[in-house]
Amino acid sequence: MSPCRKARVIAIDGPAGSGKTTVGSELARRLGYLFFDTGVVYRALTLAVLRLGISLADVEAIARVASELNIRVEQPNQSDGRPYTVFLDGEDVTWQLRSQEVDRAVSPVSAIQAARAALLGVQRQVVAKGKVVVVGRDVTTVVAPEADVKVFLDASPEERARRRYAEAAARGEAVTYEDVLSNVLERDRIDSGRETAPLRRAPDAIYIDSTRLSVHEVVEQLMRVICCDGQSQG
Ligand code: DC
């Protein structure tokens, strides 16, 4: 049985398709905590870069924009299905961060080391307020290595591909399971070998293999570790 922990900050990372977003948002809802998906800061920067008409090859200009951005991530301010509200220079951009233009450009933008460094402070400020479930590729190792509970959520490549395939099929996309699986394997290879923010497992992170677990079962397991039975703590 895990010891009872008092957790102000819970950090979850793991490979694409491991369920960290679904689990993280459900856990935050149960605890009454902010759900902070760190991908939004890279998406907000990308939106700002696109609006300014800056070339994605102009690394210096992008890093400069990153250092000047004013990003706030808060609890949802509307009941339109949003898991949080993101403000960019005071403007609510929550849904704009999900546009296809941002989708296409966010990966190269998030690979710029100077931009990552500039956005670290923003992420740490959100985390420092506490009562937060923070999710993303480098949160247990870089953004919140001091988190009270650190989780590395995993699942087999086949299961992650099955989940991604089901999501794509639900959106009406014409893809095959085999295509999705080879994409997952390729991303794993790049993600663990790349220089910028490689996916690493913190040695003191709780490892959960969700291959045969439902979202509910993973959340229940984490609630037992956090041990506050759905009550948020001060
Ligand atoms: O999870 P997402 O699709 O919103 O992430 C957007 C991009 O940002 C994606 O290219 C992964 C990257 N990202 C990152 O490099 N580090 C994080 N902590 C979170 C996201």
Image (cartoon, rainbow, N blue to C red):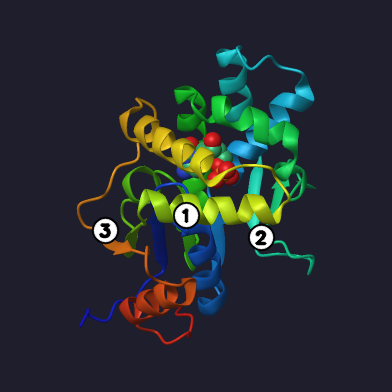
* Residue kind at label 3, given as amino acid type: Ala
Secondary structure under tag 1 reads strand
Q: For the N terminus, which image quadrant? A: bottom left
Compute the Cα span from label 1 to label 2: 13 Å
Mark 1: C-beta under 8 Å from nearest atom of ligand 1? yes
Count residues near mark 2 (Cα–Cα under 10 Å), then give few for <14, some for 14-19, many for 20+. some
Position of residue 128 measured from the top left corner of the image (x, y, whole percent): 46, 56
Tell me the CA gap for discs 2 and 3. 25 Å
Q: For this view, does 37 lie left or right of residue 105?
A: left
Q: Which of marks 1 and 3 is nearer the N terminus?
A: 1
Q: Is mark 3 within 8 Å of ligand 1?
A: no
In this view, the residue in front, 130 or 28, is 28
Residue ID for mark 1:
135
Q: From mark 1 to mark 3, how far is it between C-alphas?
A: 13 Å
Q: Is mark 3 on a helix, strand or loop?
A: loop
Residue 186, given in percent of the width and then of the height, sits at 41, 33
What residue is shown at x 52% (from left), y 42% (from top)?
180
Q: Which residue is the site of mark 2?
A: 84
Q: Does residue 173 lie above or below 65 as drawn?
A: below
The circle drawn on residue 205 is: 3
Q: In this view, does 51 lie above or below 93?
A: above
Label 1, residues with CA under 10 Å away: few <14, some 14-19, many ≥20 = many
